[in-house]
Amino acid sequence: MKNPSKIISKNLIVSILVFLSVAALLSAYSLPSEKETEVKLSQVVEQINAEQVKSIEIRGDSLHLELNDGAKQVAKKEAGQSFASLMSDYQVTPEKMGRVGVEIRQESGFGYWLGQLAPFLLPFILVIVFLWFMMRQVQGANTRAMSFGSSGAREMSKDSKDRITFKDVAGVREAKEELMEVVEFLKHQKKFINVGAKIPKGALLMGSPGTGKTLLARAVAGEANVPFFHISGSEFVEMFVGVGASRVRDLFNKAKKQAPCIVFIDEIDAVGRQRGSGLGGSHDEREQTLNQILVEMDGFDPNQGVIVLAATNRPDVLDPALLRPGRFDRRIILDEPDINDREAILRIHAKDKPMEKTVDLRRVAERTSGFSGADLANLLNEAAILTARRNKKTVGQEEVLESIEKVLLGPERKSHILNDREREVTAWHEVGHAIIAHLLPHADPVHKISIISRGMAAGYTLNLPNEDRHMHRLAEFMDNLAVYYGGYAAETEIYGRDNLSTGPSNDLQRASALAKRMVTEFGMSEKLGPRAYGKKEEMVFLGKEIHYEKDYSEHIAEEIDQEINRILGEAMETARRIIRDNRPLMERIVAELVEKETLEKEAFEAIAGPGVSAQPGSNKG
């Protein structure tokens, strides 16, 4: 809400400007077009006798003279005295008066009184208008202050042009099948009520950011052709006590009037976190808002025909009372799209873009493993922006593939120019990654190598899986660890430890984190056995991990370190062995990379040959 003092100050300035503008207009209206000289009656008489006056216009008590030379004059006479008697008193002869054109202009009664009263009434009128304007604004501010309790939810009517249906949402087949039940409940309520089935109160959409939770909720409303109320969880909570609960009541009251309808609460974890675990005790505004949501969803007054959809990417922090049957009866998980879903999503987002016929969206889908729907939409948008910057009319395959690298790694750093020594070191580093990924059977194949800086990286090797994987094996992890050490091993083998650069720092962090998870989470250590070590402790009010609970002894901690070092040592030895055995081949690839700066998959395999086939049962295609 706007500050009332600021509103009054603004209105005061506006009123002063209006007053000055009106005064300027009135003054301009009242002033004659030519300046008149004020003279005495005796001078008027002398000029008439001297036959210097051409005409006289009588306006009430004013005499407006026009002389023979064109000059303008004005004189005042006594009120109530006629001009003829005045001239007679001054002994002006009729012959002299006959040579002067005399015109009497009579003012109407309204004009006369307006001219008399306007100078007095106008200031009062302006003051009254100003006071009324200020009072109206203050009353509006008070009204807005009292309307804090309204929900402010955006409503999308059944006839809205922005409505979408399931055909506008690619992928998430299982989620759409689950939500079709909700659509059926909304369309044919009596069919379910007649057999004693209760209409579900709510469905919770859970998934990573960008997987299409909000889009899917809109599609449910469009498919069922019912009103759709959309609000974010953070919009309920204000600094004033009771506002959140009041907004919840207002939202459900509006929804009941439009039933059957859908209420969608985005990011419900903003108000739906576990109670009793916040700072300053449990009786805070957020928890009162949550209590009201719980009552509205399944209290003494059940809402018939109002289905609540909610979205969150943090279901682990939600209060158990939200998740029980009778409130969110359906829990729908939205996974990252697989290769077929990614291709379908790309086709939807490519409809409104002039794509060249040579664009292979299947190839793009292969290179975008792990991308969410939002990432894919952003990818094609970046490709369109790049096309416009290049003054092209259609989006080509080159722009799309280049946009993948921009989304993954960041934009090209054209100002970050490496010297010859750095270019050579970077080339050996990246070829070290590439050759190991190319020769190990369970590593992801190489799609591109570049020594052009992107984001924070001086160069990069793009190796992506040919198919989507939902489970990973020990052999894959060991090969990936060797790939991580490829750059480090190449630099130490070629230049020696004394000339080791800071380039492998990120590779070492990723390798150490993966080895730790293999030992402590995945049970992949033969020595320590199938057990998970350490428990993540999380404070709900912070919403992030703060430390691990150590549930093992110091002796086990030492053995964990030894196992992590053993796994990393094996990966490092594998990387060194491959680089020693293939140094002549790497020299040819490095020379080509330094010359061209970028090698695509075809150019790389033309030098390195076909990759090693994966063992039967592996995930590598």
Image (spheres, rainbow, N blue to C red):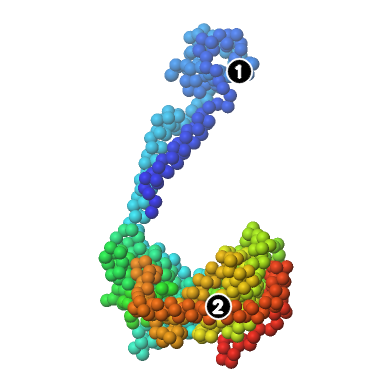
Q: What amino acid does circle 2 point to?
A: Met
Within 10 angstroms of label 2, few (less than 14), some, or many (20 or more) residues? some
Residue lying at the far bottom of the rendered structure: 616
Quarter of the rendering occupied by the N terminus: bottom left
User: Left or right: 382 with respect to 137?
Assistant: right
Residue under label 1 = 71
Residue 179 is at least partly visible in this image: no
Of residues 319 and 471, the one drawn nearer to the viewer in this rendering: 471
Q: Earlier in the sequence, mark 2 or mark 1?
A: 1
Q: Amino acid at mark 1?
A: Ala
Q: Residue 588: in sight, yes or no?
A: yes
Q: Which residue is mark 2?
A: 572
- Give x and y (percent) for residue 155: 44, 68
* Residue in the foreground of this view, choosing between 338 and 118: 338
- The image position of residue 509, as x and y in percent, is 50, 71
Secondary structure at numbered mark 2: helix
Q: Do tag 2 and tag 1 residues touch (Cβ < 8 Å)?
A: no
- Where residue 80 appears, as percent x and y from the top left, is 43, 19
Q: Residue at x 36, y 79 (%)?
A: 555
CA gap, disc 2 to disc 1?
109 Å
* Direction top: furthest residue: 91
Residue 247 sits above or below residue 332 on the image? above
Name the foreground residue: 519 vs 416.
519
Name the element at disc 1.
loop
Q: Crowding near pointer 1: few (<14 within 10 Å), some, many (20+)?
A: some
User: Camera-side residue: 485 or 441?
Assistant: 485
Residue drawn at point x = 36 percent, y = 64 percent: 236
Residue at 48% across / 80% down in the picture? 566
Give the image quarter of residue 228: bottom left
